[in-house]
């Protein structure tokens, strides 16, 4: 009779453990679903913002590359228009004040 009581207790313990694991899994699933919903909303907002700039999201990498090239070109033009800075060790011609 004692072995049957011990066996029943063991089964009860195992069953309780399974119940706890199932509850934990339900909680984790709900948390993951909420995170997914939030990320999907953020994604939709970002897609709308990108489209608001007249760019399709699939073309974003190409647009970034184009803008980087445009910036590099504009910087080169600006640098060409300005005289170089005088080196601190280079004396200025007589009559010039820095």
Image (spheres, rainbow, N blue to C red):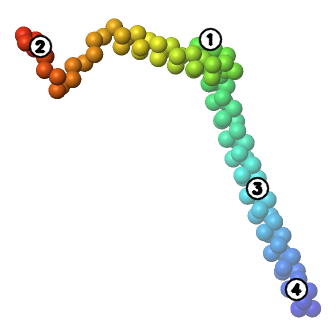
Q: Identify which residue, 78 or 24, lies in the foreground.
A: 78
Residue on which disc 4 sits: 5
Disc 2 and disc 4: Cα gap in Å?
106 Å
Residue on which disc 2 sits: 93
Q: Secondary structure at mark 1?
A: loop
- The residue shown at (47%, 16%) is 71
Quarter holding the C terminus? Answer: top left
- The residue shown at (90%, 89%) is 3
Q: In the figure, 40 relative to 18: above or below?
A: above
> Which numbered tag is attached to residue 54?
1
Q: Identify which residue, 31 or 59, lies in the foreground.
A: 59
Asked if the residue at tag 3 contacts the one at tag 4, i.e. Cβ–Cβ closer than 8 Å, the answer is no
- The residue shown at (84%, 79%) is 10
If you read the primary sequence from the N terminus, does the residue marked by circle 4 or circle 1 appear first?
Answer: 4
Q: Is residue 15 left or right of residue 83?
A: right
Disc 4 and disc 3: Cα gap in Å?
30 Å
Give the number of the mark in front: 4 or 3: 3
């Amino acid at each position: 009779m004692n072995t049957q009581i011990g066996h029943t207790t063991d089964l009860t313990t195992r069953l309780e453990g399974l119940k706890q694991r199932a509850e934990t899994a339900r909680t984790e699933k709900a948390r993951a679903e909420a995170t997914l919903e939030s990320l999907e909303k953020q994604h939709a907002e970002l897609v709308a913002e990108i489209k608001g700039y007249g760019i399709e999201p699939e073309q974003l990498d190409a647009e970034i590359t184009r803008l980087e090239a445009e910036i590099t070109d504009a910087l080169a033009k600006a640098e060409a228009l300005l005289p170089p800075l005088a080196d601190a060790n280079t004396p200025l011609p007589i009559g010039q004040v820095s």
